[in-house]
């Protein structure tokens, strides 16, 4: 494959590179604020993962936080040592599962309906999360007790300002979603920053520019009790979700979007890629990272088609982390939460459409069952139960 097909740099790739900010930024910033992770370590590991995975695989590759770990860590204000312990344990588990070929066995045992169920559930969760950002009821907004925590105005004529901004951004996105001249992702991100500045978001960077490199093990090496807690409270709940969404559903979606160009995106390669990222994140004090079907859908929906999008967003994060250090969070706070919400809604709806290639009643039953269990508990449980039921209903005596 020629370099020009693997790497393109244009408005669409730029817009697509920003497509998954709605998932990435809220969790990353919350883990810095509420858990005390290193801003430089968090965004340097994100930028490096984007850049290296894109260059290696040669197509658009998503980078996402591990949501089970992130959500639990934020909700309980967990110590950095326990989060970093989970990064190291997840990296080790993924490396073993990938190198031994265990993931290939899991893949063979996973019916298509289960993969579609994971993709549908992830998409619905993204849409739901996006709507919460728009109406101001996400966990981050509730903790900050504001619909737009970084804006001076919270309402206009008794209407939440997030709802007004989100509604306008959604309409603009609908108009420009398929435009190559004016990519929707680029318009709403730049428009969102301008809106943030106009409505009181301020950032003083006059003395902020400097040269910053991450500390090695900034919080020291976690203790035995940290690893024990992380294993049972974080890693075991996260691992099934990672294998279902960040490996099986992700590689399947990559083949759907890119065909033969995604030949390098195998289940084993995805596991090893995430393992290396989590080892590095552990060393620099970042957060647990993965790939993910939702992230790929987001990048693709807003225009990303090559690894050029990875290079663009990777360099953005690396540059901001190195030259702005801990002040990088101030820059991202210019973007209203409702803008991130709109991006989540469109990315999630894109991912839900993958179920359209199902044609059997039993397959639709499995996908909706996984969705229901996910909404009632979590995606990991949905994946596990979906696997069991999918194999049971293959028996001809059972019908739905």
Image (cartoon, rainbow, N blue to C red):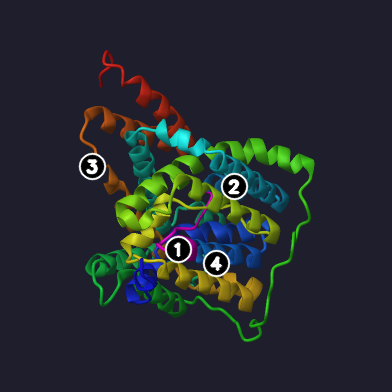
Residue position for label 2: 75
Q: Residues within 10 Å of mark 1 (few under 14, many from 20)?
A: many
Mark 4 or 1, nearer chain start: 1
> Any mark on residue 357, and which?
3
Residue position for label 1: 21
**Does 129 sit above or below residue 112?**
below
User: Marks 3/2: CA distance?
Assistant: 37 Å
Location of residue 399 (image quadrant) = top left
Question: In the image, what residue occupies the spot 34% across and 76% down?
Answer: 11
Residue 188 showing in the rendered view:
no
Residue at the far front: name it: 1
Q: Residues within 10 Å of mark 3 (few under 14, many from 20)?
A: few
Q: Residues within 10 Å of mark 2 (few under 14, many from 20)?
A: some
In the image, residue 331 lies in the stretch drawn in magenta: no
**Residue 266: x %, y % from top left:** 44, 48
Q: Helix or strand or loop: what does disc 4 sit on?
A: helix
Q: Helix or strand or loop: what does disc 2 sit on?
A: helix
Q: Nearer the viewer, mark 3 or mark 1?
A: 3
**Residue 299: x %, y % from top left:** 38, 61
Residue position for label 4: 47
Q: Helix or strand or loop: what does disc 3 sit on?
A: helix
Residue 321 showing in the rendered view:
yes
**Residue 37: x %, y % from top left:** 66, 59
Question: In the image, what residue occupies the spot 66% across and 48% down?
Answer: 88
């Amino acid at each position: 494959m020629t370099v020009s097909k693997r790497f393109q740099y244009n408005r669409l790739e730029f817009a697509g590179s920003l497509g998954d900010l709605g998932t990435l930024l809220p969790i990353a910033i919350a883990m810095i604020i509420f858990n005390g992770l290193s801003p430089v370590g968090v965004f340097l590991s994100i930028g490096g993962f984007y850049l290296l995975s894109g260059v290696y695989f040669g197509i658009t590759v998503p980078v996402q936080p591990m949501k089970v770990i992130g959500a639990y860590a934020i909700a309980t204000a967990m110590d950095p040592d326990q989060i970093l312990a989970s990064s190291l344990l997840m990296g080790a588990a993924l490396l073993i599962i990938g190198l031994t070929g265990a993931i290939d066995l899991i893949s063979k045992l996973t019916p298509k309906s289960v993969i579609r169920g994971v993709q549908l559930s992830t998409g619905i969760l993204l849409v739901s999360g996006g709507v919460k950002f728009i109406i101001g009821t996400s966990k981050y907004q509730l903790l900050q007790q504001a619909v737009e925590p970084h804006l001076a105005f919270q309402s206009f004529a008794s209407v939440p300002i997030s709802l007004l901004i989100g509604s306008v951004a959604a309409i603009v996105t609908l108009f420009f979603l398929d435009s190559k001249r004016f990519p929707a992702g680029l318009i709403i991100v730049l428009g969102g920053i301008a809106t943030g500045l106009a409505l009181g978001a301020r950032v003083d960077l006059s003395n902020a520019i400097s040269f910053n490199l991450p500390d090695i093990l900034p919080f020291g090496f976690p203790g035995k009790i940290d690893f024990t807690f992380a294993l049972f409270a974080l890693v075991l709940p996260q691992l099934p979700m990672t294998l279902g969404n960040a490996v099986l559903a992700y590689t399947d979606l990559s083949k759907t979007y890119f065909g033969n160009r995604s030949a390098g995106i195998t289940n084993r390669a995805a596991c090893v890629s995430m393992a290396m990222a989590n080892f590095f994140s552990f060393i620099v004090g970042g957060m647990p990272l993965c790939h993910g079907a939702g992230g790929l859908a987001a990048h693709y929906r807003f225009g990303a088609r090559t690894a050029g999008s990875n290079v663009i967003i990777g360099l953005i994060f690396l540059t901001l982390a190195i030259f702005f250090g801990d002040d990088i969070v101030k820059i991202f706070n210019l973007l209203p939460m409702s803008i991130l919400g709109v991006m989540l809604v469109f990315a999630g709806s894109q991912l839900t459409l993958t179920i359209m290639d199902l044609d059997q009643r039993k397959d639709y039953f499995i996908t909706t069952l996984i969705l229901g269990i996910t909404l009632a508990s979590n995606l990991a449980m949905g994946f596990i139960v979906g696997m069991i039921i999918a194999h049971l209903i293959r028996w001809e005596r059972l019908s739905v």
